[in-house]
Image (cartoon, helix red, strand yellow):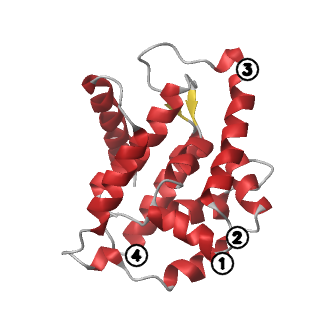
Amino acid sequence: MDAQKFNAILELAQHEAMRRRHLYLTTEHLLWSLLKTPEVRQALRAFGVLADVVSDEIEEAFKMLESDAAHELEDESLAEMTPDVEQVLYLTMQHGVSAQVKFPRAIDFVIVMLDNFRPEDSTAVNILSTHGIRSPDLKKWAAAQPDKNSSSNDDSDDEDTIEILHVAGPFSPKETGKKITDSITKLIFDTFSKK
């Protein structure tokens, strides 16, 4: 995964939170976004789970959140990342650094979620666990996949990014997209400058 795809996943999660007027960007928004990547869809399919089924269950979780009007975002505001999302981003990027890759794979975000949250603490993890998706199994699956990070001429990441951005549909005005990217970049910079 490159920086463009990494940003596209996070922008899609932020866009979905904003579209739904959610006050917070949660692990459910992040998982919803990750489900749009071919890699995560393929991993789930390898375990007999359809990404669309998981996505539908996340939609139900969103509906429960939307029934609580106290969690409604004001116009043109960014949804605030929860500490759980910040932890997932930090640990996933840290994993990438320890694995000596610029950016981790999409599946690594899911693995980090499963490794660090209990089903009772995260709806996203609960949904995955209900389908029998476990971190050790995903790690074995991921280890058996070709390493796209080592190939500099691989255009499949570009295709994945285009697919992710296409799913997002039209973004809010250009300045909102820039705000999203700036907030993501700042979070990553702040996270790694704390080390």
Q: Residue at x 46, y 67 (%)?
A: 95
User: Which one is nearer the viewer's eye here, 96 or 146?
Assistant: 146
How far is disc 2 from disc 4 in space, using C-alphas? Answer: 21 Å
Q: Are marks 2 and 4 in contact (CB under 8 Å)?
A: no
Mark 4 sits on what residue?
99
Q: Is residue 143 above or below residue 108?
A: below
Compare marks 1 and 4 and give the one earlier in the sequence: 4
Locate the C terminus by quadrant. bottom left
Mark 2 lies on a secondary structure that is loop
Q: Position of residue 110 (x, y in %)?
A: 57, 61
Q: Are marks 1 and 2 in contact (CB under 8 Å)?
A: yes
Instruction: Give me the disc on residue 134.
Output: 2
Mark 1 sits on what residue?
137
Residue extending farthest to the left is: 153
Q: Residues within 10 Å of mark 4 (few under 14, many from 20)?
A: few
How far is disc 1 from disc 4 in space, using C-alphas? Answer: 19 Å
Amino acid at dot 1: Asp
Q: Position of residue 38 (x, y in %)?
A: 46, 64
Q: Are marks 4 and 3 in contact (CB under 8 Å)?
A: no
Amino acid at dot 4: Ala
Mark 1 lies on a secondary structure that is helix
**Image quadrant where residue 186 sits:** top left
